[in-house]
Structure formats: structure tokens, C-alpha cells
Image (tube, rainbow, N blue to C red):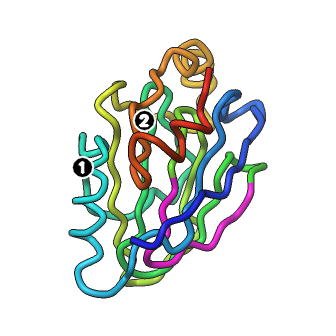
Amino acid sequence: MTASQPLTFLFKDDGEVPNNPAFPALIYKGAIDPGGDPAREIETLFARNGWGYGQWRNGIFPFVHYHAMIHEVLGIARGRARVQLGGPNGETFDFAAGDVAVLPAGTGHQRLSGSADLLVIGAYPPEGTYNLCRGNNPADRDKALATIPKVPVPASDPILGKNDGLTKLWRR
């Protein structure tokens, strides 16, 4: 692992996607060495740091979506992707193998493009309940505004563990 402190990005409610008013999205560039078996390394690291719940291997949906009842971590094991965070008015990021994004509940995200070999490892902390909300659904947004502030802060950061990263940056 080569991770240092994450880059932080706080996105405002844009009227469609609520985002998270209290916690920034965290981006770890080059957190994982893409050599060897990066998918297995990411899965092991996430699980060791308490983010093994609901682990999956796939990509990132190509439509704007968010999770209003749980936080999410995305690790790029292989390939490249251009991803928009924060909803339609958010920021665009280029992710490569080894990068990791930690998305607080409510953070809009969508894949704008990706390489044919893109492989993303996703996971969640044990606190919270998985749900999928679409950015263009006002009913989802209204419910999300009530649930996002209630999602518990995880006990550890999926990359840096219990004493760094989001444990210092996400405080109520």
C-alpha cells in the first residue's frame, strides 16, 4: 500500500442530488500498487479495515446515482474511468488502477467513460443499509434528505484504518 492523506471534496446539494452536507468525498490517488493481484489486495485491505460488507467486483453505473443510507468505497483494481462525483453539477475525476474513492452517503456518482478492462471493487461499512437512489427522482431526494444525516460515521477508514483518514475528517 502506498496511500497517504486523501484529497477531499465537499459537494453541495444541487436540487437533484443531495450529496452530503457534512462529510467530504475522499480520493486516494495511487493507494494500491496495481501490480500483482490488485483486486484481491483491495478486497483484503477493505475487509481488514472494516469495509468488507457487501463487497462486489464490477464497474460503476453510467447513470447518476447515490446511496442515502450507507457510505461506499470504490477501489480501481484495473483499467481507467472518468467519473463524475457530486451529481450533474459536480466535478469530473480521472481514476486509474490503484486509486480509491470513499463516498459519504448522498454523494452522487456516475461513470462517464471507462476502459474495456475496468474492474472496480466496491464495499460498505457494516453500519447502514444499502439503497440505490437515482439523481432524477424527487421522491428519492426527499427521503434522502432525512436519512443522510442519520448514517453512522464508520469506525475506520477503508485505506488508513482506525486512526486516520475519515476518522479525523468526518466528524459530526
Quadrant assignment for the N terminus: bottom left
For label 2, count other residues whose C-alpha is less than 10 Å away and answer few (under 14), some (14-19) or many (20+): few
Inspect the magenta stretch and tell me whether residue 70 lies in it.
Answer: no
Question: Which label belongs to residue 47?
Answer: 1
109 over 112 or under it: above or below: above
> Furthest-front residue in view?
163
Residue type pointed to by label 2: Leu
Residue bounds of the magenta highlight: 91-101
Residue at 29% x, 41% y is: 50
Front of the two marks 2 and 1: 1
Question: Which label belongs to residue 56?
Answer: none
90 over 62 or under it: above or below: above
Residue type pointed to by label 1: Ala
Q: The residue tagged with tag 2: helix, strand or loop?
A: loop
Relative to 50, is 10 on the left or the right? right
Residue 82 x, y percent position in the rendering: 60, 71
Inspect the magenta stretch and tell me whether residue 99 lies in it.
Answer: yes
Residue at 22% x, 59% y is: 44
For label 1, count other residues whose C-alpha is less than 10 Å away and answer few (under 14), some (14-19) or many (20+): some
Residue at 71% x, 49% y is: 9
Q: Nearer the viewer, residue 118 or 77?
A: 77
Q: The residue tagged with tag 1: helix, strand or loop?
A: helix
Quadrant assignment for the C terminus: top right
Image quarter for residue 40? bottom left
Magenta-colored segment: predominant secondary structure: strand
Which residue lies under the disc numbered 2?
132
